[in-house]
Image (cartoon, rainbow, N blue to C red):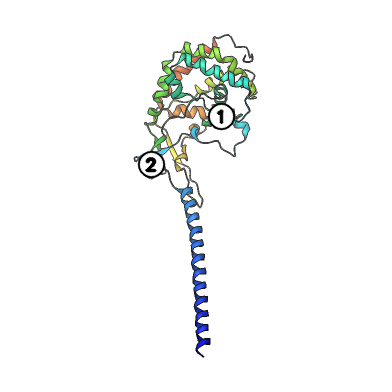
């Protein structure tokens, strides 16, 4: 009788051990799955680091392109097209010409020198539009973030005067190069600009005409005597907004309806905006008296 009983006990112990090991393995697998899900959720909803008490926001023009927007409203993407060797050589000539008129330090600090001609014409054309992606700009993005002085309720605020300081270096650079030098540069590189304009397929046959139209458009941007009011656009959903600081819109419908280029001028602050208007007016006057450039191809 003892041997059968002993065998039964051993069998029970073996079965129990197998069950314990199976349970342990299953628990480990479930723990790994939960950890993986928690990691992905944390990365998805982790808020950006903030500094100071002022609410920060990126300028509207620094947002990535809206994937739902029709391509016709944004114009062609100059960086997505295949570039022939002649265009690459033209861009190199553009950069060399620019470097003859400004310092190497300024060239490196302010400009994106790849695909220069295509960047200039694409950005010029999109400034009067609702959106102008920073990815095609010929200049680097303005350092820092668009800042707002929040209301007590946290649902809105006013444009912070600190935004002007972000634009000061670039504005000082633009003013440091006198208008005749800018016009000299323009005349030297115009064939390259015109060819890039044609290659990108814009409907207006003359880049010169389009440039004057865009300057006229920018000059209509209203200079704000006081900091504009803003409000936060409510976004509902199961997951918190990953970038809540980009939800600011102007409370004044007239300001909110401005183009991308006009909003940049407003964000510069009244004093900087007025200085930029003076420079644009000077450039337009000089461009207007130029003999209209012929739409010839770049050599």
In-front residue for pair 92/226: 92
Q: How far apart are the alpha carbons under marks 2 and 1? A: 31 Å
Quarter of the image for residue 176 reads top left
Q: Is residue 267 visible?
A: yes
Residue 64 x, y percent position in the rendering? 52, 36
- The crowding category of the residue bearing disc 2, from other C-alpha atoms within 10 Å (few below 14, some 14 to 19, many at least 20), is few
Residue 50's disc is 2
Residue placed furthest toward the front: 3
Residue 286 x, y percent position in the rendering? 51, 11
**Image height check: is 47 above or below 178?**
below
* Left or right for 5, reference 87: left
Quarter of the image for residue 190 reads top right
Residue 247 x, y percent position in the rendering? 47, 41
List the residue tagged with mark 1.
129
Quarter that holds the C terminus: top right
Q: Earlier in the sequence, mark 2 or mark 1?
A: 2
The residue sitting at 50% across, 76% down in the picture is 16
Q: Of helix, strand and loop, which one carries label 2? A: loop
């Amino acid at each position: 009788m003892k041997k059968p009983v002993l065998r039964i006990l051993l069998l029970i112990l073996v079965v129990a051990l197998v069950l314990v090991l199976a349970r342990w393995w299953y628990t480990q697998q479930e723990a790994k799955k939960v950890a993986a899900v928690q990691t992905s959720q944390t990365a998805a909803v982790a808020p950006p680091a903030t500094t100071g008490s002022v609410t920060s926001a990126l300028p509207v023009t620094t947002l990535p392109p809206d994937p739902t927007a029709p391509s016709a409203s944004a114009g062609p993407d100059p960086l997505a097209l295949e570039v022939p060797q002649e265009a690459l050589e033209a861009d190199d000539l553009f950069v060399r010409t620019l470097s003859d008129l400004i310092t190497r330090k300024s060239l490196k600090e302010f400009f994106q020198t790849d695909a220069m001609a295509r960047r200039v014409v694409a950005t010029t054309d999109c400034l009067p539009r609702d959106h102008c992606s920073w990815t095609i700009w010929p200049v680097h993005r303005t350092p820092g973030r668009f800042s707002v002085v929040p209301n007590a309720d946290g649902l809105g605020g006013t444009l912070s005067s600190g935004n002007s300081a972000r634009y000061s270096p670039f504005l000082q650079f633009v003013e440091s190069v006198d208008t005749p030098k800018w016009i000299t540069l323009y005349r030297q590189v115009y064939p390259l600009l015109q060819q890039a304009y044609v290659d990108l397929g814009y409907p207006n046959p003359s880049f010169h005409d389009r440039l004057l139209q865009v300057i006229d458009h920018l000059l209509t941007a209203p200079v704000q005597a006081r900091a504009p009011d803003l409000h936060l656009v409510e976004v509902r959903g199961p997951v918190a907004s990953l970038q809540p600081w980009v939800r600011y819109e102007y409370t004044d419908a007239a300001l909110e309806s401005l183009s991308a280029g006009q909003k940049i001028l407003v964000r510069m602050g009244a004093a900087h905006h007025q200085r930029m208007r003076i420079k644009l007016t000077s450039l337009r006057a000089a461009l207007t008296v130029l003999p209209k450039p012929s739409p010839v191809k770049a050599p």
